[in-house]
Amino acid sequence: MSEVKKVRTAVVGCGMISNIYIRNLKNLFYIIDLVAVCDLFEAAAKRQAEAFGVERVMTIDEVAAADDIELVINLTGPVAHYDVIKKMLLAGKHCYTEKMFTTDLDQARELVDIANEKGLYLGVAPDTVLGAGIQTAKRVLDAGFIGDVTSVQVHVNRNQTLNSEIFKFLRNNGGALPYDVGIYYVGALLTLLGPVKTIQAVGKPAPVHEAQMLFASDPGESWQIPGNNILAAALEFESGAVGSVLFDGNTTNSTQHGFTIYGTKGILKVGDPNEFNGEVRLILPESGEAVVPFTHGYDGKNVLGGEPQWFDGYGNRGIGVAEMAWAIRKGRKNNRCSKEYGLHCMEVLIGMDEAAASGKTYEPKSRFVMEGLTPGYYSTNGGGRGDAERSLMD
Ligand SMILES: NC(=O)c1ccc[n+]([C@@H]2O[C@H](COP(=O)([O-])OP(=O)(O)OC[C@H]3O[C@@H](n4cnc5c(N)ncnc54)[C@H](O)[C@@H]3O)[C@@H](O)[C@H]2O)c1
């Protein structure tokens, strides 16, 4: 790989999730050269630069003006996404953003248009769909083991109001369970079953938070997580398959999650799409149920060595960036965590809310293509970071 020029990259937003991103971007992917970090609060950027050995701490204007930086990774909170991405695209930078793409569909469409007009790459998380679990499930489906997919059922639950005592960003737009967690399920649904044609749904809001449940909020503080915190939706995919989705953020944190795909010849159970290593189980008539060995690398484990860190559980975040960086260098499309995928994820979630509000069927306009990663490369093959990055190259 040594003849390929690395992509000089900056991270904007040095909060919680930047820990796993910066560690992975510095050490896990050959293709990325992380040269700068930036935050509204210089101290946050300085802290991360020192902790992970990043050369430069920059302001957002300096990042936009830096001729040598090709790619900007946006790790700010969702409400800041639109402004940061637009600024970087207009400055001629390729951009990759954490989820949600933006908090408004028209803004996301505008960013897609700007990227298209300027011929820039724009990628969107979640990239958990590029992990070993979902990629293995995709390979089983593409190989026809369960025949034609007829239907899918997914569900996840939490007590989002309780969680919003600790994680204050959950009190704002994007904090309701369907957006904060359901997005991983939507990303996996789209990766495995393709675009959604129609959506029907019912929804319920979160309760008003009045009484302290933990000791993490100030007495008397009151708020209500905006939007629907429960969504029950019926989806029809363009492929003809149908799906049932339940996100319930008004119950307990005893999380039960399910992801079952039914086909004409078998059934596939997919693990937690919020992880990189969700177990894949195949059920075929007369054969019972069996675990499918992973066909891909990036199973979320830290292969970089060193002391265990509190953020290890966030896995291989950054694969989506590395895949896009390879697309930039090879001059191919990034048909994995692309802007079209990000836009469709967002439109499906917003479509559920709109269908619930109107009582009418919502028909998403956006479409996307999702190609699988190249199988047969693993994170521990040969030690260190293995040869897994080869799966991102083409
Ligand atoms: N927290 C999680 O578990 C998690 C997991 C996966 C993805 N994400 C996503 O990652 C993103 C960041 O989440 P987080 O938990 O790290 O949030 P955070 O609030 O901890 O960090 C965001 C950082 O961005 C900075 N920032 C905000 N606006 C800025 C601007 N205009 N310019 C420069 N810096 C700015 C803030 O100062 C802050 O340091 C969100 O999109 C979130 O949805 C979070």
Image: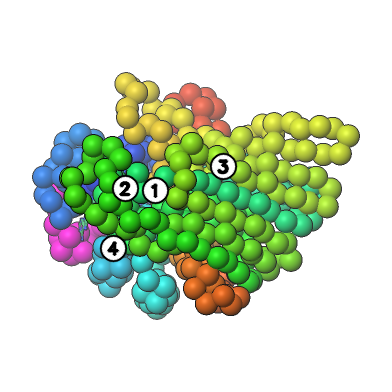
3 vs 1, front mark: 1
Where's residue 284, x and y in %?
82, 39
- The answer as to whether callout 4 falls within 8 Å of ligand 1 is yes
Calculate the distance from the C-alpha at mark 1 to the C-alpha at mark 4.
19 Å
Which quadrant holds residue 324?
A: bottom left
Is label 3 or label 4 in front? 3
Which residue carries the number 1 mark? Answer: 160
Is 183 within the magenta?
Answer: no
N-terminal-most mark, 3 or 1: 1
Q: Residue at x 86, y 39 (%)?
A: 285
- List x then y, in percent, for residue 182: 49, 53
Please identify, in this view, whether the residue under mark 1 or under mark 4 is nearer the observer.
1
Q: Which residue is mark 3?
A: 257
Residue type indicated by callout 2: Ser
**In this rendering, is residue 264 above or below 28?**
below
Query: Which residue appears at 65% of the width and 48% of the height?
Result: 138
Task: Tell me the residue that label 2 is attached to.
Answer: 164
Could you tell whether 54 is left or right of 260 in the image?
Answer: left
